[in-house]
Structure formats: C-alpha cells, structure tokens
Amino acid sequence: MSEHRTIIEPFKIKTVEPLAMLARSERELHLETAGYNLFSLPSRVVTFDFLTDSGTTAMSAAQWAAMLVADESYAGSRSFTRLETVVRDLTGCPHIIPTHQGRAAERLLCQALVKPGMKIPSNNHFDTTRANIEFVGAEAVDLVIPEGRDPNSRHPFKGNIDLKRLEGFLQQNQGSIPFGMITITNNTGGGQPVSLQNIREVAKLYKQFGITFIIDCCRFAENAYFIKLREPGQRDRSVRAIAEEIFSLADGCYMSAKKDALVNIGGFIALKNEDWIERLRALLILTEGFPTYGGLAARDLEAMAVGLDEVLDERYLEYRLAVTRYMAEGFNKLGIPTVQPPGGHAVYIDAKSFLPHIPPRQFPGQALACELYLAEGIRGCEIGSVMFGTFHKEGGFIPAAMELVRLAFPRRVYTQSHFDYILEGMAELVANKNALKGLELVYDPPFLRHFTAKFKPLAS
Ligand SMILES: *Cc1c(COP(=O)(O)O)cnc(C)c1O
C-alpha cells in the first residue's frame, strides 16, 4: 500500500447516532456538578468518549444480522457451535467455555486452580486479573522488560517479558505456579505489543518447567498486526497466520471479547487439554450459566463469532493502528508529549511534562483531563496520582510514578474528521496551558478513588 495515501476508514456507515455538541459554558456547569470527576458525567454531555475501548465497539451489519438468526436454546444452541468452530479454528483449542466478559474467565480460572500463596507470572497483569488472583490469596507477578516501564523508550515490543527474570522466577517458584501468563497487547503497560520471538521463548521456558501457558488475548489481533509491521521476517505473513502461531505456542487462552472480538459484551476460555474443563464448567454453571451460553444470550455468541473473523481483516487493522499513531503524532507536533511509541488502543498524554507548573499534589493529569472535557467535550481517564497516589494521615503524600491522561479509542466509532477537529482544538489548549490550574481533592473515598472522588479547582 502506498505510504502517501491517507489511511481511510475501511467501512461505510449504515447506522448513526447524533453527537452531543455543547457550549463550553454548558460543559462548565456539568463538570462542576460532577465534582470535576469525568466518571460522574452522563454520556449525553460527552462529545468524544475516550474513557475506554472496552465494549464500545460499533458492530457491523453482518454482526447484527447474525444476532437475528441466533438460536436461544438453553442447551446445545447452534450459536454456541458456531462460536466454538470459530474459536477452535483460530486458537487450536478444542475446549471452549463462553463467559460474560474477561473478568468472569479470570474468576473461573482463579477459583478453580489457584490456592493461597501461589504466584502467577506475566508481563503485566491487568487490574481485574491482579484483583482476581489476589482475591484467592495468590500473588500476581509482573516481569515486563525494563523498557516497558520507561515512557520514552522506543523499543518496538515494550510488552515483552524479561526472559532472564522469568527463568529465575520459575527456578525459584516452580512448585507454586498454577499457570504462567502473558497479556497481548500489554494493556497495563500502555497497549504495547509482545513480539512473536518473545512469545516463543516464554512458551519454551514454561514448557521446560512444566507450567501450563495461558494467554490473556484481549487484543490478539492488534498484537499480531504489530508483529507483522515491526518484527523482522513477518511482513509477508497474514495476520491470521501470525495469530494462529501465537495461539499454537500456548496451552490455552482467555479473552475479554469486548476488545478484539468487536462486541459490546462477551468472553471465553479456550483450552487444549481437558484436565481443567470439568472444574471450570462446574463453577460456570454455579454462577454464569449452562456451558453452551455461559452468562450470555446466544445472539452475543453470534456477534462474537463474526467479530473474531472481522477483526483479522488487515485493512481494518491498518486503520485501527493508524488511529493511535495519527493522534500521538498530532499531539507531539503540537508539543503535547505522549508515551512512546503509541500502542494499539490508546494514547497516553504525559501531563507531568506538559504541565510542569502543576505539582503532582495538585493532580496535573486530572487538571488536563478536565480541560480536555471543557475545551472539546473529550472524556479521557487520569492514570496518575488520583488513581495511584497515596495520602498519609499525617498529611504526607506519595505521588504516582507518572501523571498520564489516557485517551482510549473505541473501535470503528469515530472518523478522521473527528480526530482532526480534536487536534485543531488542541492548538488552542497548548497556547493557554500556562493558565491551567491544579485541583484540590475534597472527597477521598476509601477504595478506588478515581471512580468517585470529588475535586475543586484551585483559585488563581
Ligand atoms: C479488559 C481486560 C480484561 C478484563 O475484561 P472485562 O471484559 O473488562 O472483564 C482482562 N485483561 C485485559 C488485558 C483487558 O484489557
């Protein structure tokens, strides 16, 4: 494909929804009512909702059509058979358990297989993975390469596992590892990909130590396309062939289908070996549902089956990764620093370097997230001292390591002109950035501060 042509949305639009377009003065009122916390805004006052790429996909006509012919039988639904065939073909795993989303798969695996004191290695565990592992008294261990922790490193595969550390870890803990993992792409590390070579080496190590290898494969297609673009010798392979090789290296996988299966709800566990299946199905029946629907309607199974195929369309993936790249480059040209290189599903603005006049104690990430809303109706998510900062009773404060604002892009939802419009507005924001003020925390909830905290802008 020619380098000089615009990468266009590889779809045309059949169903539309009006965009909320408010005046800045209206947004000011809504933000004040929300206590300067974007999670408290109703979506009807948000123009560009970049809170998450999870479950926010626009579905295709083919997916909606498949939903109409779904078979809602309680047991043995043909929609399940259809999903089973698609997942088997892709992953090479004969045993498929549908779940209502990714964390349900995590809960089943953890409750069936993990005992207190056990340890599970990965590159970085996603929040819900870590929470499910810790809930059963085990430890989630992150072994990403050092470049993966450096926002300025331009390493092409910042999601890779540090193989030396993994080997040492396996030697020391061999008896207490129920399974070993890797997350593709590495969401917690910024949506950074893992190389095929790294997955091969990780698989070899797990095998050498007799440990079952499970992939958290939420964004397997985005990861496979990064491999095609960036890894020597992979350019001429199809993304499907790369994805199939990735799955062939593991003993199984689980997925939040709300990402790369292009649906609004869904997930599954897929395993090669049947050893764990009875235990997992027993837990599934207890709280999720019968093994051929697993907490979903059959129409959701149909949409997943179609989505898992559509996501491997290389024109789609080319466009998908172009969105994050385009936005990161656009921000950088305007002097807004972002974590490098851009990952698959989100851009992370470095608010600490962009707003050096706002100290971490005054939440530069949250201040920027609020201004993005006021200026353009954008809803992003602070990942900094609001989320991870620690306050001591005596008044001490330990800031987070980074002050980021994440803009996660829903799949197939916004167009090039939306993104151009956003970048135009950013130029103004940059010109006025020195006037931006920090925030004061006025309500600090006991858990998960970022969801319900309230703030007040500091006076000039
Ligand atoms: C979203 C996500 C999950 C959890 O999936 P849900 O569908 O939100 O429950 C697990 N792992 C990764 C890497 C994710 O991105």
Image (tube, rainbow, N blue to C red):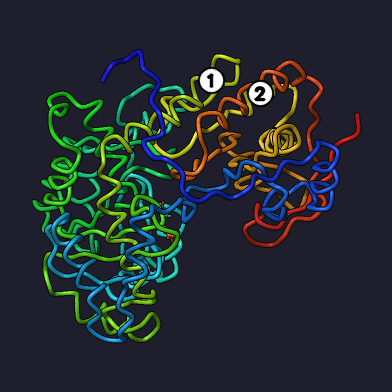
Instruction: Decide: few, some or many residues near mark 2? Use Cα within 10 Å; few <14, some 14-19, many ≥20.
Output: many
Mark 2 belongs to which amino acid? Met
Foreground of the two, 113 or 37: 37
How far apart are the two marked residues, 2 and 1, measured between alpha carbons?
9 Å
Picture quadrant where residue 460 is located? top right
Considering the numbered disc 2 on the image, is that residue within a helix, a strand or a loop? helix
Q: Which residue is mark 1?
A: 330
Q: Residue at x 86, y 38 (%)?
A: 25
Counting residues from the start of the chain, the first of labels 2 and 1 encountered is 1
Instruction: Please state which of residues 451 and 113 is positioned toward the viewer in this rendering.
Output: 451
Above/below status of 79 relative to 222: below
Determine which quarter of the picture holds residue 422.
Answer: top right
Ligand 1 placement by image quarter: bottom left
Dot 1: element: helix
> Picture coordinates of residue 207 (x, y %)?
10, 53
Side (left or right) of 352 relative to 298: right
Tell me: residue 303, above or below residue 22: below
The residue that label 2 is drawn on is 426
Q: Are marks 2 and 1 in contact (CB under 8 Å)?
A: yes
Q: Which residue is located at x 69 percent, y 48 percent?
A: 38
Q: Residues within 10 Å of mark 1 (few under 14, many from 20)?
A: some
Label 1 CB sits under 8 Å from any ligand 1 atom = no
- Report the disc number at residue 203: none
Q: Residue furthest right?
A: 459
Residue type, numbered disc 1: Gly
The quarter in which the N terminus is drawn is top left
User: Farthest residue toward the front?
Assistant: 14
Residue 189 place in picture, x, y as percent: 42, 39
